[in-house]
Amino acid sequence: MYKILSLIFLISISFTFANAEVTNVFEFTDSELSKLEVRKIRGAKNKTIYSVGSNENGNFLKAIADNAASGLGKEINIDLNKTPFVNITWKIEKDLQGIKENTKKGHDFAARVFVIKKTGATPLSNRAINYVFSSNSEVGLNSPSPYTKKSIDNVLATTKENLNKWVTVKANVKEDFKRFHNLNVNQLDGLAIMVDTDNSKMKAISYFQNIYFSEN
């Protein structure tokens, strides 16, 4: 039911680039992928298939979801006072046109990146922001998940303008937690990638590249 609550694992890689603080999240290598557990969402018929590839800009993750839902996650400590901005480069080759993404029956996204803050003793108490590449909504639209108000869907890109095109987006996670959850968050606790089509029973093909946090 709560698609993100169990998608957390452990790694963190920090480095300095061009005199700016940067925290990289994923390497998108075969070695990394082999060590991550792919967790199918309860009730989903199939798992999303993840594989790695590369292009002139480096490694990427490819995801194929055919009536499927599973995610890759990492438990990662991000200092949002130093690096509050999440940066995502992604592409959707096959989207999910025609579904109502703010309903339980249509709550699927061809690409999504969750950021997670632990706010209690159990995963059910976590708060999340779900940054999505929508197939139907406009950039800037946000709404609570139809499954839980503790997760907010926030549209950063749309296939209405960028189908099968690489798009780079940025969001201030610290400000968004205050705006959506009224929380002053200094440290982020986890991040997860997911492509899911278990509600719509459709097929999506997506790519992720260069997910990192920066100071500006």
Image (tube, rainbow, N blue to C red):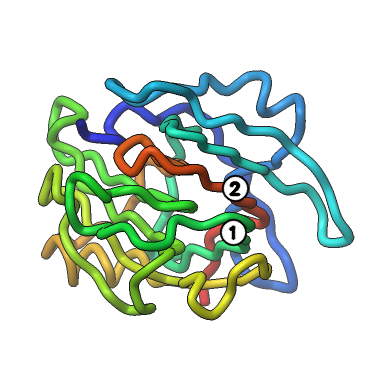
Give the CA distance from mark 1 to mark 2.
6 Å
Residues 114 and 119: in front is 114
Q: Percent x, y for residue 121?
A: 14, 26
Residue for point 20% across, 39% down: 126
Residues 54 and 180: in front is 54
Looking at the figure, which quarter contains the N terminus?
A: top left
207 to 177, vertically: above or below: above
Viewed as shown, does residue 16 lie left or right of 170?
right
Residue for point 59% across, 39% down: 64
Structural crowding at the residue carrying mark 2, measured as other residues with C-alpha within 10 Å and reported as few (<14), some (14–19) or many (≥20)? many
Residue for point 52% across, 31% down: 48
Q: Percent x, y for residue 193?
A: 48, 43
Name the kind of residue labelled 2 in the image.
Ile
For label 1, the residue is 92
Name the kind of residue labelled 1 in the image.
Ile
- Report helix, strand or loop for mark 1: strand
131 to 207, vertically: above or below: below
Residue for point 21% across, 45% down: 105
Viewed as shown, does residue 211 lie left or right of 143?
right
Q: Quadrant of residue 62?
A: top right
Structural crowding at the residue carrying mark 1, measured as other residues with C-alpha within 10 Å and reported as few (<14), some (14–19) or many (≥20)? many
Residue 74 seen: no
Specify the label residue 205 is tagged with: 2
- Report helix, strand or loop for mark 2: strand
Q: Quadrant of residue 164?
A: bottom right
State which tag comes first along the sequence, 1 or 2.
1
Q: Percent x, y for residue 98?
A: 35, 62
Circles 1 and 2 in contact, beta carbons < 8 Å: yes
